[in-house]
Amino acid sequence: MKRVFSISLARDPGLSNSPVRQDLSRLQIRGPDGNTGYLCWRKYNVNSTSEKTRIATVWLDGCSGCHMSFLDIDHRLLEIADRIDLVYSPLVDRKEFPDGVHVTFVEGAVTNEDDDHKIRLVRERTKLLVALGDCAVTANVPSMRNIFSVEDLYARAYLENVTAQAQVPTQDIPPLLGRTRPVHEVVPVDLHVPGCPPHPDHIFFVVSELLEGRVPDLRKVVRFG
């Protein structure tokens, strides 16, 4: 059956109390089942100075496929290399997320306490936050565990499927949250880039548009569903 989506400008009522409410312009997406979702972005340039644009990438609960897709931009990275400064990423060695980041691309859903802490810190320290890929946008595959309780998950992973020293770890492993959540349910997100993973062309389009001070109109290159 053909899927039809209607698109209209709208405010997200779920962000009525958000401190960034006045900075958001939104596209409301209505699917064939009547459900609605939102595309959004902040209405400002990511970098109004002559300095290089400070970009970060973050990996939460995901498979790293979105980062691999980012690398698959290949030689086109050279076209923008002199305009960006990659200040934090699994691809570089920096351990602490810095202040003053212009754009952060986040892969993965928010599943454990470390994810929750990290994404809140990232939101505080970055100007524009991009949910990269379906795990960040919808929670996707990681959210399949949401039908089970945390206790049942721990029992299955650490008690039932072991042959020695059956115990639930209390150190080194970050505790699971009650449910896995997409990034926008935890902090405000400025742009969603869907895909599992997003195509390298789509990622390059987003980066290029942001560097030019334009809002990436993803309707030109990708669709939800």
Image: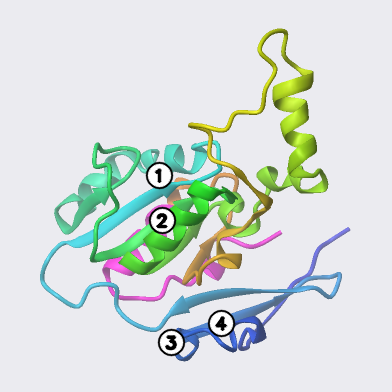
Q: Earlier in the sequence, mark 3 or mark 1?
A: 3
Amino acid of disc 2: Phe
Residues at badges 4 and 2 in contact (C-beta under 8 Å)?
Answer: no
Q: CA distance from mark 2 to mark 3?
A: 19 Å
Nearer the observer: mark 3 or 1; the answer is: 3
Amino acid of disc 1: Phe
Q: Please state the extent of the stretch shown in magenta in the rendering.
A: 203-225
Q: CA distance from mark 4 to mark 2?
A: 19 Å
Q: Earlier in the sequence, mark 2 or mark 3?
A: 3
The residue that label 4 is drawn on is 26
Q: Position of residue 171 (x, y in %)?
A: 51, 32
Q: Secondary structure at mark 2?
A: strand
User: Residue 23, which numbered label?
Assistant: 3
Name the foreground residue: 54 vs 94.
Answer: 94
Q: Secondary structure at mark 1?
A: helix
User: Residue 70, which numbered label?
Assistant: 1
Q: Earlier in the sequence, mark 4 or mark 2?
A: 4
Q: Secondary structure at mark 4?
A: strand
Residues at badges 1 and 2 in contact (C-beta under 8 Å)?
Answer: yes
Count residues near mark 3 (Cα–Cα under 10 Å), then give few for <14, some for 14-19, many for 20+: some
